[in-house]
Image: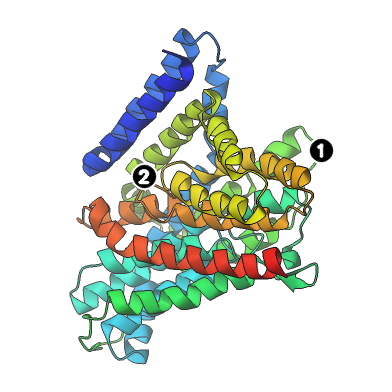
Amino acid sequence: MSTFVIAIILFAITYVLLFALPKYRAFVALGSAVVFSLWLGLLADDVTFTFSNVLGAIDFNVLMMIAGTMGIVSLFIESKMPMRIADVLLSKFKNVKMAIVAMALLAGIVSAFVDNVATVLMIAPIALAVCKKQNISPVGPIVSIAVSSNLQGAATLVGDTTSILLGGYANMTFFDFFVFKGRPGMFFAVELGAVLTAFILLYLFRKETQPLTLKDRTEVTDYVPSFLMIGVVVLLILASFLKAPAGGALLTLYNLRNGIICMALLDVGILVNLIRTKSLSSTKLVIKEMDYQTLLLLASLFVVIQGITSAGVIAKLSEGLVALGGSNLFLMYTLIVFASVIISAFVDNIPYVLTMLPVVTGVASAMGVEPYVLYFGLLVGATLGGNITPIGASANITGIGILRKEGYEVKARDFMKISVPFTLTAVLSGYLFIWLFWGIL
């Protein structure tokens, strides 16, 4: 069998096992990463896959950012600030349903300016606190927060890696995502989806009408973690405006900037706590609360995706997609959007978008049209498509990891009860909006 066929078979087996064995996803992914690495590195004659390729596949910037934010979140929870914010939510909304939708919308707003994973790590403790106070399951609220953060990540240049990729490739600025060439940009397409999906959440949680009760207000014991959380948001936004240096050590630091920011702020939090308490309790807390399974799962999936990319699977998918579209712009646009949704539900959208951007440009050039409608269609499909499955986006994996630590194992069908109607609504609204303003007008 060819390398291409073997890669597809291994990839299919991996994802079947990921769905079938939710408690062991990290170890399934690790095993798959090892198999891909050994097979491509030692047995496949037509592919070069060295140890350097394995290390290069792992996005250490993302892993450091997640680890640093996890540590800050553990200090944040220990300070009782999430419980205090939960008290405010409980006092402002009439019932559980409205509180869940409010938290999802809050996650969306934050995620438009901060990485989706960091957003989930910031907002999830608040949701957990509300659920504990009301004695309800946190599964629905956490899943809603994860999918909402994925949706809004496409709203701005700094909200998601795929947006950054498009902005860099098409020479778009931060403000071009709002108004571009005199037309509404991605921001408005995403916000339309956010409004409509709020109604979807209201319907999905329509039975959660139990009134919110507030007994005693929680007293915050330490405000430093709250300032560190704010610092994460502000510094990540500022870092997104930095221009990449030409190369060398500075480029390496630039590529790790988000991770360095989060890890540095975590160090500040531990140091301040150490000085204040004269105890190693904060360090022990961070080590204990770190979700190592989620970090292992993500690192392993990076290698798996690089494996199928090196084997030519993603390139073949892209070529097949283009062959189906022909010369009809609407048909091509439709194929790109919905094929991207399906592919991104199972494949990391970063290598897919990287592969498709030059393909889309070539197709637009051959058709004699500007590529922007296809660019935006690609972003709508690839960014939102990861919302469908529990393992389609890093934010989803992170949210499920948080729930697992709380003792809740989330099955794929439970996740998809929320994610499928949410995603289809967001994709369809974005699909129609982009075509109206960029395909017709």
Which element carries disc 1, helix, strand or loop?
loop
Labels 2 and 1: the sequence-earlier one: 1
**Can you give x and y, in whole percent of width and height, for residue 228 in the image?**
53, 64
| Residue positioned 29% across, 39% down in the render | 18
Amino acid type of disc 2?
A: Thr
- Classify residue 159 by image quadrant: bottom right
Q: Residue at x 32, y 86 (%)?
A: 90
Q: Is residue 26 left or right of residue 226?
A: left
Q: Secondary structure at mark 2?
A: helix
In the depicted structure, whether residue 42 falls above or below residue 58: above
Instruction: Please name whichever residue, 389 or 118, is drawn nearer the observer in this view of the structure.
Output: 389
Visible in this render: residue 219? no
- Quadrant of the image for the N terminus? top left
From the viewer's perspective, tell me whether residue 32 is left or right of residue 251.
left
Q: Is residue 437 left or right of residue 66?
A: right
Q: Is residue 60 visible to the viewer in this orientation of the structure? A: yes
Q: Quadrant of residue 278?
A: bottom left
Foreground pick, 401 / 15: 15
The structure residue drawn at horizontal position 37% and vertical position 50%, both measured from the top left corner, is 397
**x then y, percent, for residue 182:** 79, 72
Q: Which mark is residue 246?
A: 1
Mark 1 residue type: Ala
- Residue 236: x, y in percent? 62, 59
Residue on which disc 2 sits = 294
